[in-house]
Image (tube, rainbow, N blue to C red):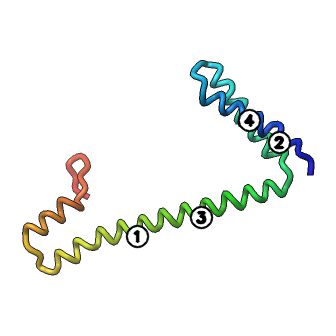
Amino acid sequence: MPLLFLIPLFTGLVTAYIFKKSTDEIGQLIGVVAVISLALGLILAPWQVQLLLLVVVLVGTQKLLQQNEYKLRQQKKQQEQPNYNHSRQASSSEVQKMENEFTRKYRGVNY
C-alpha cells in the first residue's frame, strides 16, 4: 500500500495548525490550502483507509443520534410528568411551582 496519500494529509494538518494560530489574512489563504490538502489526501488514500473512515463516521453518527433520541425522550417524560401530577389534585402552590418550572416563554407566548 503506497503511503503517498500521507504527504497532502500531513500538509493539510500542518497548514490547519498554522491557520488556527494565525490572525492575519494569510491565515485565510492557508485555511483554503489546508482544506484542499485534506480533501486530496482523502481522495488519494487507499480504499481500506477510506472504508475505515466511512465506518468511523457511520458509527459516530449513530451514537450521536442515539444520544439525541435519549435526550428527546427525557424531555417528553419531563413534560408529561407535570400533567400527571396536576391530575392528582396537587395543592395550588405545588401546581404553580411546577408550571413556573416547566413553562417556557418566548416573546410573551407560553410553550
How far separated are the C-alphas under marks 1 and 4?
41 Å
Residue bearing the label numbered 1: 73
Q: Position of residue 93 (x, y in %)?
A: 8, 67
Category of crowding for the residue at label 3, using alpha-carbon neighbours closer than 10 angstroms: few (below 14), some (14–19), many (at least 20): few
Q: Mark 1 vs mark 4: which is more N-terminal?
A: 4
Residue with the mark numbered 3: 62
Q: Amino acid at mark 4?
A: Gly
State which tag comes first along the sequence, 2 or 1. 2
Disc 2 crowd rating (10 Å Cα; few below 14, some 14-19, many 20+) is: some
Pointer 1 local density, CA inside 10 Å: few below 14, some 14–19, many at least 20? few
- Asked if marks 2 and 3 touch (Cβ < 8 Å), the reply is no
* Quadrant where the C terminus is found in the figure: bottom left
Residue 105 x, y percent position in the rendering: 23, 52
Which of disc 3 and disc 4 is earlier in sequence?
4
- Residue position for label 4: 12
- Mark nearer the viewer, 1 or 4: 4
Q: Residue at x 74, y 39 (%)?
A: 38
Disc nearest the viewer among 2 and 3:
2
Q: Amino acid at mark 2?
A: Leu
Q: Which one is earlier in the sequence, the residue at label 2 or at label 4?
A: 2
Q: Residue at x 67, y 57 (%)?
A: 57
The part of the image, by quadrant, that contains residue 6 is: top right
Which residue is labeled 2 in the image? 6
